[in-house]
Amino acid sequence: MIVTGDIFNSTSYPLIDVRAGGSVRGEIAALNNILDKTVSWRQEGGTMIIPGHGRLSNEWEVTEYRDMMVIIRDRVQAMMSKGATLQQVLAAKVSADYDARFGSNSGPWTTAMFIEAVYTSLKE
């Protein structure tokens, strides 16, 4: 069993606190660290993963979450390499295919705040 805290959250995008030194790279590295310590969900005795928020999960779901993070990072990075501003990245809706599951337009952590954190952390 692994308790992930808010590194893995099965109900929303991860909170990346850029002002405190957080980054999309650090989030992906932390997810990879969790995955390095798990036993596959297909095996007897597979690792149960308790997310910071959401239901009990397994290695497969953390892998899916990590892959989502990598895809969004790569999309933002590709736009940035072409000179895109934060507003252009937000307008492109780079996370649209994940927003139904993880996104939010209101509350303490919105999709726009997440994309801004990814963008800002990649600029540093």
Image: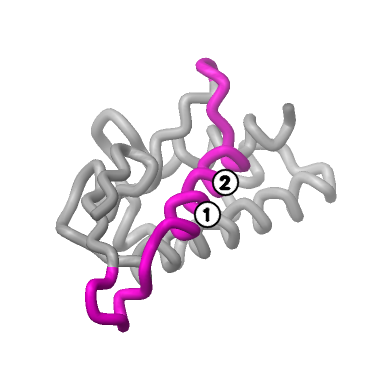
- Indicate the position of residue 64 as horizontal and vertical percent values: 43, 67
Q: Kindly state the secondary structure of the residue where label 1 is placed.
A: helix
Kind of residue at badge 2: Ala
Which quadrant holds the N terminus?
Answer: bottom left
**Residue 118 in the figure: left or right of residue 112:** right
Q: Kindly state the secondary structure of the residue where label 2 is placed.
A: helix
**What's drawn in magenta, residue-wise?**
19-46
Q: Is residue 3 above or below residue 36?
A: above
Residue 13 located within the stretch drawn in magenta: no
Q: Residue at x 42, y 60 (%)?
A: 65
Q: Residue at x 55, y 35 (%)?
A: 116
Q: Nearer the viewer, residue 115 or 25?
A: 25
Task: Quadrant for residue 75, please give it.
Answer: bottom right
Residue extending furthest toward the left: 55
Kind of residue at badge 1: Asn
- Indicate the position of residue 89 as horizontal and vertical percent values: 63, 46
Q: Which residue is mark 1?
A: 32
Q: Is residue 47 above or below residue 72?
A: below
Asked if the residues shown at circle 1 and circle 2 are in contact, with their CB atoms under 8 angstroms apart, the answer is: yes
Which label belongs to residue 29?
2
- Is disc 1 surrounded by few (<14), some (14 to 19) or many (20+) residues within 10 Å? some
- Indicate the position of residue 14 as horizontal and vertical percent values: 39, 42
Number of marks in the rendered image: 2
Residue 28 located within the stretch drawn in magenta: yes
Q: Is residue 66 above or below residue 46?
A: above
Q: Is residue 85 above or below residue 77?
A: above
